[in-house]
Image (cartoon, coloured by chain):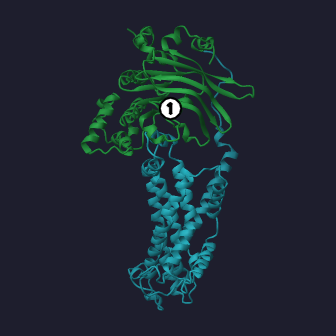
Chain colours: A cyan, B green
């Protein structure tokens, strides 16, 4: 026998489709659309402005007073050189600092608390301040010419160091405590546990964070401008004390040049910089997804 | 014969023989007290752990049985605020003596945890890790032999011999736990500590681990913490019953109520609190 229940009607207008829900969703979509719109306008106009300069000369020739002959060779090589030295300085120090703070530091001690707080703050310090700091250090060291590779790398390394430390700590924190316990209970020392278990398990997270930090260094111009960046270099950077220019600086100088045609080269170089940054971020996302661990 | 009565034969049916009596203690706890900062968590534990016996620690949550277990291989030291007074005598050495290296202690007293915790490495490397970090200089064949030996001891060899290069996470929960036991065996420990090793396993995996413990005790000394009283009755020779109490200052602390042959604890305990707990009247 079936029981008749009077209020058992499930037909009717969906509660998901009432006016409020639709407006709410509409606002969300609109916000997303606005954000995308500006990005697309920027990309398309830059891409179109650079039209005609997507050629090999962009890579092979140095800067020139004739816009048609100007290329970004020195800037591309300079960026690669400076960022490599930056990475060599910031990544080992950053990882080591993070390992100390996460695995060995006694968090109840006041100086460790002070260090923690300061690193959080340093990550939010404007880039130009790192340029000023580096300028001061190079002056103290008595360097007359401050626009040198090692100077630029130092400024950028200081800039990304807090980011490397913070992301490495996040990655270490994501490694379950059980893995450390298991290793220690087998008679491994704390150093062995870090080097053979915790760090290897955290490598994907560290790699992702580090790549993002380095890509930030590639796109940064402010601290380098403060060091008196050169914009007219017609040789490949050939040493740590050699003068250099980087892509953001070269683009900056071309955009502010009097001749209209330089803007075309600037746009072409901007697109190249964007491609480099997007592929680095792509690699970071790939690593994150490919090696993401489920414990 | 049911598995129950099979298992009971060790602890209960043969209880009248010397099985549950300590022939030779391997560890002697003397007035062990554990503090976390100012908190006096475990008070005045004195008990003996017999060589080649299974000793079970039972008792309600918060009675300090896991804390005491972790003192036996000094993993409790890893809690920064932890402090211990009293002594644990292990083969003539004071475990907490000033000249004792905790790392060496952990190499001799292995541990298996409540939640299976394989390393994010291959099955082979999970087993080979202990020997590698403890500085056993083994060549390739010796390592392979040791891995096979340890997996055999843990009753896992037949199941994994064709996939030693696969991740330890690819195994089921019960297999993972036996992998962790094999991992502990690979460093040739003297004593195996097990902290609720079956708490996250199904009954079939649990019974496999229990059978394994009865095998292992021929070569090793086993100390197990368990919430499962049937398990304690099935596998152990001696049982220590811990309980929690509140002192005059209102602090809750763990203490040992009594320790005896498993058969005696489960049939004729000396303390009424033990009987209440065993019969399910509290805890």
Q: Residue at x 47, y 21 (%)?
A: B55
Can residue A257 be spotted in the picture?
A: yes
Residue underneath mark 1: B72
In this rendering, the count of numbered labels is: 1
Q: Is residue A4 above or below residue A225?
A: above
Report the side of A259 relative to A280 (left or right).
right
The percent coordinates of residue A38 (x first, y second) are 59, 67
Residue at 62%, 19% in the rendered image: B283
Which is more toward the observer, A21 or A227? Answer: A227
Q: Which residue appears farthest toward the bottom when viewing the image?
A: A65
Front residue of this view, candidates A173 and B66 = B66
Residue furthest to the left in view is: B141
Picture quadrant where residue B181 is located: top left
Q: Position of residue B113 (x, y in %)?
A: 48, 33
- Which residue is more in the foreground, B77 or A272? B77
Q: Callout 1: 10 Å neighbours few (<14), some, many (20+)? A: many
- Quadrant for residue B40, please give it: top right
Q: Is residue B159 visible?
A: no
Where's residue B200, x and y in %?
A: 49, 28
> Which quarter of the image is occupied by the N terminus of chain A?
top right
How far from the left and from the top, in percent, is residue B10? 41, 13
Q: Secondary structure at mark 1?
A: loop
Most foreground residue, B135 or A155: B135
Mark 1 chain: B
Vertical placement of A234 versus B92: above or below? below
Q: Which residue is located at x 37 percent, y 33 percent? A: B185
């Amino acid at each position: 026998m079936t029981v008749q229940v009077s209020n058992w009607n499930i037909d009717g207008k969906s509660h998901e489709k009432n006016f409020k829900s639709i407006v709410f969703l509409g606002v969300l979509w609109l916000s997303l659309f606005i954000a995308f719109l500006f990005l697309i306008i920027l990309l398309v106009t830059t891409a179109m402005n650079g039209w005609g300069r997507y050629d090999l000369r962009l890579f092979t020739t140095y800067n020139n007073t004739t816009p048609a002959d100007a290329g970004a060779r020195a800037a591309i090589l300079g960026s690669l050189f400076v960022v490599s030295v930056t990475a060599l300085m910031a990544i080992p120090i950053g990882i080591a600092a993070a390992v100390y703070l996460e695995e060995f530091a006694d968090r109840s001690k006041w100086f460790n608390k002070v260090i923690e707080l300061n690193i959080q703050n340093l990550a939010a310090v404007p880039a130009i301040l790192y340029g000023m700091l580096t300028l001061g250090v190079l002056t103290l060291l008595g360097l007359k010419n401050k626009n040198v590779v090692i100077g630029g790398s130092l400024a950028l390394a200081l800039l990304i160091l807090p980011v490397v430390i913070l992301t490495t700590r996040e990655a270490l924190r994501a490694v379950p405590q059980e893995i450390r316990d298991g290793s220690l209970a087998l008679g491994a020392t704390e150093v062995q546990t870090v080097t053979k278990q915790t760090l290897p398990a955290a490598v994907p997270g560290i790699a992702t964070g580090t790549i993002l930090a380095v890509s930030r260094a590639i796109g940064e111009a402010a601290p380098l401008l403060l060091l008196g960046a050169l914009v007219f270099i017609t040789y490949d950077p050939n040493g740590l004390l050699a003068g250099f220019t980087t892509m953001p600086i070269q683009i900056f100088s071309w955009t502010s040049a009097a001749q209209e045609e330089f803007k075309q080269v600037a746009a072409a170089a901007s697109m190249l910089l964007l491609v480099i940054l997007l592929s680095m971020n792509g690699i970071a996302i790939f690593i994150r997804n490919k090696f993401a661990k489920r414990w | 014969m049911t598995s129950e009565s099979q298992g009971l034969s060790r602890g209960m049916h043969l209880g009248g023989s010397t099985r549950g009596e300590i022939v030779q203690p391997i560890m002697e706890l003397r007035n062990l007290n554990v503090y976390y900062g100012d908190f006096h968590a475990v008070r005045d534990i004195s008990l003996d752990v017999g060589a080649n016996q299974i000793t079970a620690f039972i008792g309600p949550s918060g009675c300090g049985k896991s804390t005491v277990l972790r003192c036996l291989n000094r993993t409790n030291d890893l809690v920064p605020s932890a402090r211990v007074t009293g002594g644990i005598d292990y083969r003539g050495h004071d475990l907490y003596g000033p000249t004792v290296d905790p790392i060496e202690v952990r190499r001799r007293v292995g541990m298996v945890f409540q939640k299976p915790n394989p390393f994010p490495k291959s099955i082979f490397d999970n087993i080979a890790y202990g020997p590698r970090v403890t500085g056993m200089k083994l060549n390739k064949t010796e390592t392979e032999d040791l891995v096979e030996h340890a997996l055999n001891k843990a009753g896992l060899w037949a199941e994994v011999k064709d996939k030693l290069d696969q991740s330890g996470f690819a195994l089921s929960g019960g297999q993972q736990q036996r992998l962790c036991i094999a991992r502990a065996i690979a460093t040739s420990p003297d004593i195996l500590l097990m902290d609720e090793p079956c708490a996250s396993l199904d009954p079939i995996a649990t019974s496999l681990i229990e059978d394994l413990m009865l095998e292992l005790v021929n070569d090793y000394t086993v100390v197990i913490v368990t919430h499962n009283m049937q398990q304690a009755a099935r596998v152990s020779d001696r049982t220590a019953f811990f309980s929690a109490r509140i002192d005059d200052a209102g602090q809750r602390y763990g203490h040992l109520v009594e320790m005896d042959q498993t058969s005696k604890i489960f049939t004729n305990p000396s303390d009424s609190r033990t009987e209440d707990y065993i019969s399910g009247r509290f805890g």
